Amino acid sequence: MLVTGKEILLHAQKNGYAVGAFNINNMEIVQAIVEAANELNSPVILQASQGGIKYAGIEYISDLGKTASRLAKVPVTLHLDHGTDFDQVMLCIRNGFSSVMIDGSKFALEENIAYSKKVVEIAHAVGVSVEAELGKIGGTEDHITVSDRDATFTDPEEARRFVEETKVDSLAIAVGTAHGVYKGEPKIDFDRIKAIREVVSVPLVLHGSSGVPYDALRKAIPLGICKINIDTDIRATFAKSVKNFFVEHPDEIDPRKILGPAREAMKETVKEKIEVFGSVGKA
Ligand code: G3H
Ligand code: 13P
Ligand code: ZN
Ligand code: NA
């Protein structure tokens, strides 16, 4: 069933686990994620980025997400990932998303607060939850110096003020993770997660979680991380499966034969993550 981000994340917060938020771009990915969640009796978040929406089209992506939610026996949230554009956020709400992210992290604090607050007022009026971002989550660069970290990582006092003024339902924080593939091993600032959690009551969100060692993720969850975003690791599984398939079957032309094994492989990747996040049996 389709539920809001707030509902799914508050349950996670209360019960000490994290919900996986997996990026969706096509039918096979949606099915892989929801089948994995169903088999493990775990709540799950399907999230579409603006790029994913552009690729599939808003109707296709929202109908895929809603169909999967309706068929699932576990709670599913359909969420906009990194919405930077106000109209895009409104389009997702109109098309039945139960949660949206407003990413105003490129703005200075005051502007980010004002932008996020405006989205919260509208989304809450129609029962849609909102995630916002404070601090700058890395790209794929590596080896961030200490002064860079202080400049871009989420400041706990700013986080407290941000949540209080915007009334967002969850907060994405910058604590050392980055989108995409890591060159070295990411260094998570666990003390910062703890410090933010001490002054912020809403569930915290970890972006860029593909490639983060499982021990680090397991350590971050009791400190306050309730939503863990994964895209890159599913892409890698997909690509590996398709490449291997063509090595063994260079003449195959049936998309079902090519994508079927990729869907199975992605399901296994998602199951592995769900087990690490501790949400098995929590639906
Ligand atoms: O945060 C980034 C997500 O991995 C989505 O990536 O914008 O290429 O769809 P994308
Ligand atoms: P990864 O690129 O590490 O999978 O991060 C995905 C993400 O944060 C989507 O918002
Ligand atoms: Zn992200
Ligand atoms: Na990553």
Image (spheres, helix red, strand yellow):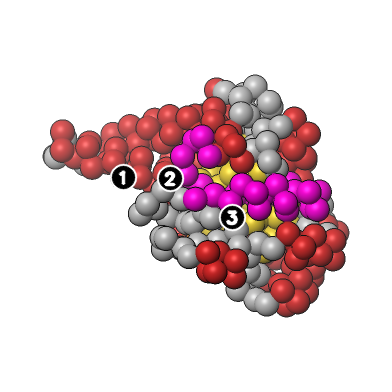
Q: Are marks 2 and 1 in contact (CB under 8 Å)?
A: no
Counting from the top left corner in percent of width and height, residue 67 is at: 60, 40
Whichever of callouts 2 and 1 sits on the residue coming sooner in the sequence is 2
Q: Is residue 13 magenta?
A: no
Q: Which residue is mark 3?
A: 175
Q: Which residue shows up at 60% across the image and 66% down it?
A: 150
Q: Element type at marker 2?
A: loop
Task: Relative to 219, say whether 112 is above or below.
Answer: below
Q: Element type at marker 3?
A: loop
Q: Are marks 3 and 1 in contact (CB under 8 Å)?
A: no
Q: Which residue shows up at 70% across the image and 47% down it?
A: 194
Q: Which residue is mark 1?
A: 239
The image quarter containing residue 6 is top right
- Please name which of the two marks, 2 or 1, marks the residue nearer to the observer: 2
Whichever of callouts 3 and 1 sits on the residue coming sooner in the sequence is 3
Q: Element type at marker 1?
A: helix
Specify the quadrant that holds the N terminus: top right
Under mark 2, the amino acid is Gly
Counting from the top left corner in percent of width and height, residue 125 is at: 85, 59
Image mark for residue 211:
2
